[in-house]
Image (tube, coloured by chain):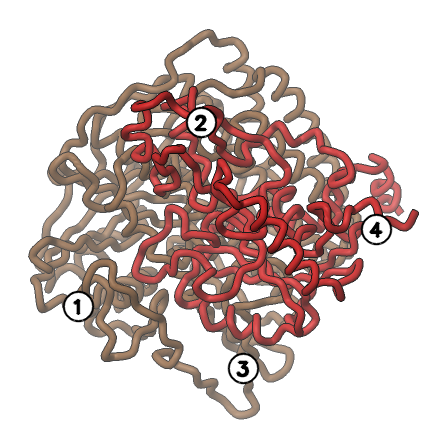
């Protein structure tokens, strides 16, 4: 019985997220943000700092997190404009909402897409079954997704499970830059899923192709192959960000249905 | 600083005698390490075979003229070259004449589709499975297609398992689904941005790729990296190795239903990724290694990181010891996926896969680089049983050594006041540099070619690509339920294999 005793050795190691922030949050870079707009005339050449074209000179200067690979070149070169953000919740419900600072009308857009999604996924209830498909990732996103089932994130506590068959899945988690060879398997998986179904693009590569695109066989992310509902930026996104995306997909965050109200007591 | 395999040291040879020369050079203590094409502006191709020698690397080069990209196949006399020739046939339309089995590998195309290198550089092509051989041969034999969408969270790969029901007489693997053509993207990038791409060739070995890429550039530019920066690189590279070996252990414990071990190893791995994040902001050690050094000092006091590392190391070795005395775990690995030593030697396999069969050098020892010569690195004693268990024993011993190296590195950094982390690389001299590091899965090779002061070509050769060709050979005498252990013990990164 040595293993049984070993299993109890450390007590509970599971994060309290999303009910409470996690101590690991400040340790890693989750996003780049525009801290301050440059003074007039000082934004020239600022877009050229980014190897993936995520920066637009504006005005206002904006960062598209759907293209950002978190290399930090912009933060190093212009610390008065750009800053790192350690956030546990970087997922968004619309491609446009990945651009920071938000544009005029983005608040309305967010409310609208959240309501549309909530209406679609009402039947998910408190249980969510996930199928993952790799469409040309670098392999790191798979590690971060797999971490969710470990004791530290333990998504089972939230009613989230991974399933072997797409026929039992509510959510399709897609990683990778959209490799042409995965287009057909990806679409067949999607069509094998029952309605309602939600597609989550995990990682900057899945959103835009990141640095890997363009090549002769990458399709610049998976949005051209499938209708994406939830966008999780990051290269790779942390398990927290992926979990945030899943909770958004369940309609359990974002004001429409607060998580606390859905607990047993 | 010497440039290994530079234009002065290489041997240029007529294509009719290329195969013979490569086979001859790969004999004895040498080992065939890869075949790399370089497209010329004329439409011709320079084909380079790289051979590892006891002291470094050497090349044989031949020119293939435009419109006639053919030469007698190297694989006829040197089976280890087979996958390389299949890859260059898919992408460049190069014809290795007499190749024993020129099936598509990374890019199946119908005869009317142009190979990417022959068409417009960035025009899109679509892999077509109709170009693949789909026949199982033998009475009562059927094929179980497994993948590219598999149960669990895995990279996309497809295995065609040919079986009568239990034994596996033949196994084929297809990894073209996630082929990204990633190496060609280097040519669009500046040398500084190239390291970001290198980190994404094999995302679970970002640090090893970044170091190998930068070492290639540093050879061409004659840049000396500051010692402290080399120590930072070593620390990150060793933490990456531990994370990969833990991941392999997790897959083994999962496959053998060791639920508690699985959970505990997952906790150790997560703690290690968190430690890495506190050092640099990235759980995968990204944005640390840059050409000429590292991007800056560690974000956390090294002595504090060292205590945390030692805590993790204690937990890992305690649980690993318990696993290695759990019969229900050992029984699944023992005798599974045996790779005979002669096959491993003939193929020139690398990394823990080779060391589990009693062979295979460690680049950190055979061609020491960076801070390794002064680190007191001790190579893992090889195990010669050649089974999945031997490969895991090698990994466990490597983890111990990596923990020690990383802890020592952090101790050095705690006591240093050096503020120089990077020496700006000068202009790249024209030529070809071959650099290698020991990645978690074995020797990782980068061929970096500069022309007119800019990157003309960068080709990574992942350990998993070289080893994967041996994968089907590990199934002799094994049955379906052994599959998970044989696969996990190979430590395959499909992103690295598919390119």
Secondary element at tag 1: strand
Mark 2, chain letter? A
Precedes in sequence: disc 3 or disc 1: 1
Give the Cα separation between the discs numbered 1 and 4.
69 Å
Give the Cα separation between the discs numbered 3 and 1.
33 Å
Name the residue located 42 percent from the left edge and 26 percent from the top edge: A37
Q: Are marks 3 and 1 on the same chain?
A: yes
Chain B drawn colour: brown
> Which residue matches tag 2?
A82
Mark 1, chain letter? B
Give the Cα separation between the discs numbered 2 and 4.
38 Å
Q: How many marks?
A: 4
> Which residue matches tag 1?
B72
Give the Cα separation between the discs numbered 2 and 3.
54 Å
Coordinates of residue B35 in the picture (x, y in percent): 26, 55
Circles 3 and 1 in contact, beta carbons < 8 Å? no
Q: Which chain is assigned red?
A: A
Tell me the mark number nearer the camera, choosing from 2 and 3: 2
Query: Which disc, if any, is residue A262?
Result: 4
Name the residue located 46 percent from the left edge and 36 percent from the top edge: A70
Image quadrant of residue B65? bottom left
Circles 1 and 2 in contact, beta carbons < 8 Å? no
> Which residue matches tag 3?
B143
Name the residue at the right extreme. A265
Name the residue at the bottom extreme. B139
Q: Are marks 2 and 4 on the same chain?
A: yes
Q: Is residue B62 above or below residue B362?
A: below
């Amino acid at each position: 019985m040595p293993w049984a005793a070993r299993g109890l050795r450390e007590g509970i190691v599971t994060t309290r997220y999303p009910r409470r922030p996690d101590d690991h949050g400040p340790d890693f870079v989750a996003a780049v943000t525009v801290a301050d707009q440059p003074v007039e005339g000082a934004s020239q050449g600022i877009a050229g700092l980014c190897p993936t074209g995520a920066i637009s000179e504006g005005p206002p200067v904006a960062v598209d997190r759907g293209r950002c690979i978190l290399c930090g070149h912009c933060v190093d070169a212009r610390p008065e404009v750009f800053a790192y953000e350690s956030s546990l919740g970087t997922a968004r419900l619309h491609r446009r909402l990945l651009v920071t600072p938000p544009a005029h009308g983005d608040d309305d857009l967010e409310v609208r897409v959240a309501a549309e999604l909530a209406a679609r996924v009402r039947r998910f209830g408190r249980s969510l079954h996930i199928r993952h498909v790799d469409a040309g990732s670098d392999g790191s996103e798979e590690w971060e997704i797999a971490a969710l089932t470990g004791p530290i994130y333990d998504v089972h506590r939230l009613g989230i499970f991974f399933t072997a068959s797409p026929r039992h899945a509510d959510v399709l988690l897609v990683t990778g830059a959209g490799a042409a060879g995965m287009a057909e398997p990806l679409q067949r998986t999607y069509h094998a899923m029952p309605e309602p179904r939600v597609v989550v693009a995990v990682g900057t590569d899945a959103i835009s192709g990141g640095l890997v695109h363009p090549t002769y066989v990458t399709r610049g992310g998976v949005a051209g192959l499938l209708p994406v509902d939830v966008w999780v930026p990051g290269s790779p996104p942390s398990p927290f960000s992926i979990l945030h995306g899943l909770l958004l997909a369940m309609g359990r965050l974002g004001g429409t249905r607060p998580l606390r109200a859905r607990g047993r007591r | 600083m010497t440039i290994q395999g530079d234009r002065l040291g290489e041997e240029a040879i007529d294509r009719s005698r290329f195969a013979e020369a490569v086979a001859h050079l790969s004999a004895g203590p040498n080992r065939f390490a890869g075949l790399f094409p370089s497209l010329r502006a004329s439409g011709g191709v320079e084909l380079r075979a790289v051979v590892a020698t006891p002291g470094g690397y050497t090349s044989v080069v031949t020119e293939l003229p435009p419109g006639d990209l053919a030469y007698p196949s190297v694989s006829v006399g040197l089976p280890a070259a087979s996958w390389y020739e299949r890859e260059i046939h898919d992408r460049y339309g190069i014809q290795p004449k007499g190749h024993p089995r020129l099936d598509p590998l990374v890019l199946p195309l119908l005869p009317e589709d142009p190979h990417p290198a022959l068409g417009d550089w960035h025009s899109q092509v679509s892999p077509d499975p109709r170009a693949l051989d789909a026949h199982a041969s033998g009475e009562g034999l059927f094929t179980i297609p497994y993948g590219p969408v598999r149960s669990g969270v895995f990279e996309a790969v497809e295995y065609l398992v040919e079986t009568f029901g239990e034994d596996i007489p033949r196994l084929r693997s297809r990894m073209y689904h996630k082929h990204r053509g990633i190496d060609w993207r280097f040519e669009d990038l500046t040398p500084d941005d190239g390291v970001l791409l290198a980190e994404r060739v094999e995302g679970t070995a970002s640090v090893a790729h970044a170091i190998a890429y930068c070492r290639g550039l540093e050879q061409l530019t004659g840049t000396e990296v500051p010692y402290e920066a080399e120590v930072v690189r070593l620390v990150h590279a060793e933490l990456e190795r531990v994370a990969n070996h833990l991941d392999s252990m997790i897959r083994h414990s999962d496959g053998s239903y060791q639920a508690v071990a699985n959970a505990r190893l997952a906790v150790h791995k997560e703690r290690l990724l968190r430690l890495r994040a506190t050092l640099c902001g990235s759980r995968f050690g990204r944005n640390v290694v840059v050409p000429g050094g590292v991007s800056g000092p560690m974000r956390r006091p090294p002595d504090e990181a060292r205590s945390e590392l030692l805590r993790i190391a204690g937990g890992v070795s305690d649980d690993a010891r318990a696993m290695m005395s759990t019969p229900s775990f050992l029984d699944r690995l023992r005798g599974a996926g045996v790779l005979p030593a002669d096959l491993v030697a003939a193929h020139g396999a690398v990394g823990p896969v080779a060391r589990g069969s009693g062979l295979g050098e460690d680049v950190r020892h055979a061609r020491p680089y960076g801070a390794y010569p002064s680190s007191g690195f001790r190579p893992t004693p090889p195990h010669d049983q050649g089974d999945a268990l031997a490969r895991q024993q090698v990994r466990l011993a490597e983890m111990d050594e990596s923990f020690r190296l990383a802890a020592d590195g952090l101790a050095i950094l705690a006591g240093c006041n050096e503020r120089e982390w990077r020496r700006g690389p000068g202009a790249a001299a024209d030529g070809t540099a071959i650099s290698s590091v020991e990645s978690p899965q074995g020797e990782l090779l980068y061929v970096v070619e500069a022309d007119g002061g800019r990157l003309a070509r960068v080709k990574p050769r992942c350990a998993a690509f070289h080893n994967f060709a041996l994968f089907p050979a590990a199934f002799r005498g094994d049955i379906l339920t052994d599959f998970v252990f044989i696969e996990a013990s190979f430590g395959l990164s499909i992103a690295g294999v598919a390119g």
